[in-house]
Image: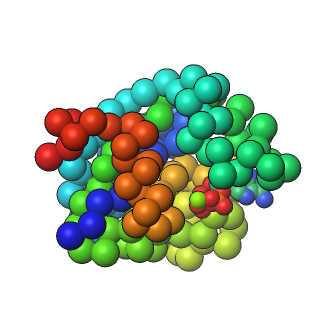
Amino acid sequence: MEQTLSIIKPDAVAKGVIGKILDRFESNGLKIAAMKKVQLSRQDAEAFYAVHAARPFFNDLVDFMVSGPVVVTVLEGENAVLKNRDLMGATNPKEAAPGTIRADFAENIDANAVHGSDSLENARNEIAFFFSGREIS
Ligand code: ADP
Ligand code: MG
């Protein structure tokens, strides 16, 4: 069993597709082990995406992530990290496979509907960033 962190980004929350995205997880063997809706501060978003601090798109990414509330979940299941990445589809929705979350709900590479941890180690760190142990079950 693995756990991974998912964020339903401001574009998808604003569009009213929280439920449709959660259904993709639950219908594909990923349980919701923890969940909350939060408005990230600039400091939160900068710290969460610190690995991308040197990238040219960093400021746009932070602006976007604080533009509205997000829904943060811990997903649990077999191969949860990779399974969630498969369900999400490619970072650029134009390249995302049909039937993936980004192909179905995302507009462009900035507003791309979801975040998902990309490794088990990053999943552990990202889960600890948002949740305490007692919030996960
Ligand atoms: P992913 O979210 O698929 O793991 P990355 O970790 O590489 O992708 O990037 C984090 C986020 O930064 C992406 O989801 C996307 O919103 C944004 N991003 C990545 N690459 C670009 C880019 N070339 N131009 C604009 N935004 C980007
Ligand atoms: Mg990433």
Horizontal arrangement in the rendering, residue 3 relative to residue 69 (left or right): left
Nearer to us in this view, 114 or 13: 114
Q: Which residue is at a point 32% across and 37% down the rendered structure image?
A: 131
Nearer to us in this view, 123 or 68: 123
Q: Is residue 107 visible?
A: no
Q: Position of residue 58 (x, y in %)?
A: 76, 44
Horizontal arrangement in the rendering, residue 127 relative to residue 52 (left or right): left
Picture quadrant of residue 77: bottom left
Horizontal arrangement in the rendering, residue 41 relative to residue 126 (left or right): right
Can you say which quadrant of the picture contains the N terminus? bottom left
Total numbered badges shown on the rendered structure: 0
Q: Is residue 29 above or below residue 59?
A: below
Which residue appears farthest toward the left when viewing the image? 137
Q: Which residue is at a point 65% across and 35% down the rendered structure image?
A: 46
Q: Is residue 52 visible?
A: yes
Q: Is residue 76 above or below residue 135?
A: below
Q: Position of residue 6 (x, y in %)?
A: 41, 51
Q: Quadrant of ligand 2?
A: bottom right
Q: Which residue is at a point 53% across and 27% down the rendered structure image?
A: 40
What colour scheme governs how the chains and residues are painted in the rendered image of this protein?
rainbow
Q: Which residue is at a point 57% across and 23% down the rendered structure image?
A: 41
